[in-house]
Image (cartoon, helix red, strand yellow):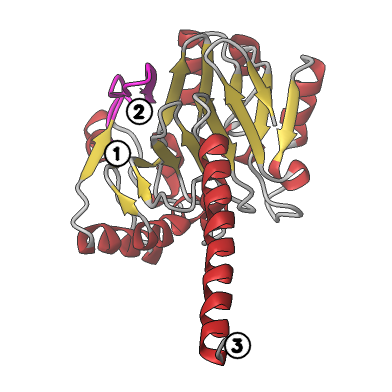
Amino acid sequence: MESNFSVKIKKIVIVGSISFFFLGVFFVYQSLKFNDGKLHVVFCDVGQGDAVFIRTPKGSDILVDGGPNDSVLSCLANNMPFWDRDLELVISTHPDADHSTGLVSVIKRYSVLSFAMANMESSTNVFKELIKSLDEKNINRKFLKEKDRFVLTDDLILETEWPRFSKSTASVLGAATSNSNTNEFSLIELLTFGDFSLLLTGDAEIKATSVIARRIGKVNILKVSHHGSKTGTDKEILKSLRPDLAVISVGKNNGYGHPSIIVMNALKELGIKFLRTDLDKEIKITSDGKKWQVN
C-alpha cells in the first residue's frame, strides 16, 4: 500500500508534467505567432497620444514613441513573445508628453539596446524623467536628422526624412526655439520593406509634411500627423502620398477636437480608407514585403 508521501510525490510529478506540457505548447504557439517571417506594425491604443510598435521579419523589436501613460506596456506584452525583454531600437519623435511619457516605463522594464531621438530639449518634468531614466540605464542617445537611417539584416530600412536640422541650431537659421514649437522639429520616419512603405509623421507640421510628401510620393500606410490635427495634414499632402490606408492615433472624446473635421473630410473626398485608435482600438498590420493586410 502506497504511503501518503508517495501519493503526494506522484501528484506533484503529474501536475508538474502537465504544467510543463502546456508551457511548451504556449511557447511553440508564441514562437509561431511572433516569428512568422513577416513585418508586424502595431498602432497601439494609448489614448490621446502616439505609440507604434514594429517587429521585423527576423524578430527585432522597434518602438516609435510611448504614448501619454504606461498603457504602451500592454501593447508590447500583447505583441512580443513573453520571454523577449529586449527592444533593439526605441525612437522618440519629439519630447511632448503624449508621445514620451510611456517611454519612461518602457526603459525601466525593458532592455533598450539603442535609443534615438530628435535633437531638442524640453523643460517639462516628463522630459527630465526620460533623460534621467536613460542615464540610469547608461543608454546612449543618438540624435536623428534627415537622411539618417537604420538598415536591418532583414532588408528593412528606417530612414529619417525630417528635420533637416536640429532645434539646437534652429536659432541660427532664424527659426523659433521655444518649447511650444517642438512639433516643427518632430521626426518623420519612412519605413520600407520590399514593396511595402509606411510613413510615421509624429506631430510634424504641414510645412514639413508637405515637403516630405512631395519628395517621397506614394506610400502604403500613413500615420496621420498630430492625431489628425489640421496643422499637420491637408488635402495636397494626401494627394501627394496617396496612402492605401491612413491611421489616426487619437484619444476618445479628447479635448482638442482631434481628428479635425477638415482632415476627415479630405480623407473621405479622396477616397482614402482610414482607421482610428479611438474607434478601432489596437491596429495591426502585417506584410511579407509584397502584400500587406490589416489584422
Identity, as a three-letter code, of the amino acid under mark 3: Met
Q: What residue type is labelled 1?
A: Lys
Could you tell me if the residues under marks 3 and 1 are in contact, i.e. CB atoms within 8 Å?
no
- Closest to the camera, between mark 3 and mark 1, is 3
Q: Which residue is drawn at 38% across and 35% down?
A: 60
Residue 100 x, y percent position in the rendering: 44, 53
Q: What's the amino acid at mark 2?
A: Pro
Residues tagged 1 and 2 counted as in contact (Cβ below 8 A): yes
Q: How crowded is mark 2: few (under 14 residues within 10 Å), some or many (20 or more)?
A: many
Question: Label 3's element?
Answer: loop
Image disc number at residue 167: 1
Residue 200 vertical position relative to residue 97 in the rendered view, above or below: above
Residue 174 pos. (x, y %): 29, 32
| Magenta extent | 145-167
Residue under numbered circle 3: 1
From mark 2 to mark 3, how far is it between C-alphas?
A: 80 Å
| Mark 2 vs 3, N-terminal side | 3
| The quarter of the displayed image where residue 7 is located | bottom right
Q: Which of the labelled discs sits on residue 142, or is there none? A: none
| Magenta span contains residue 295 | no
Disc 2 on helix, strand or loop? Answer: loop
Q: What element carries label 1?
A: helix
Residue 205 left/right relative to 250: left
**Crowd rating for badge 3 (residues with CA inside 10 Å; few <14, some 14–19, many 20+):** few
- Where residue 63 sits, quadrant-wise, is top left
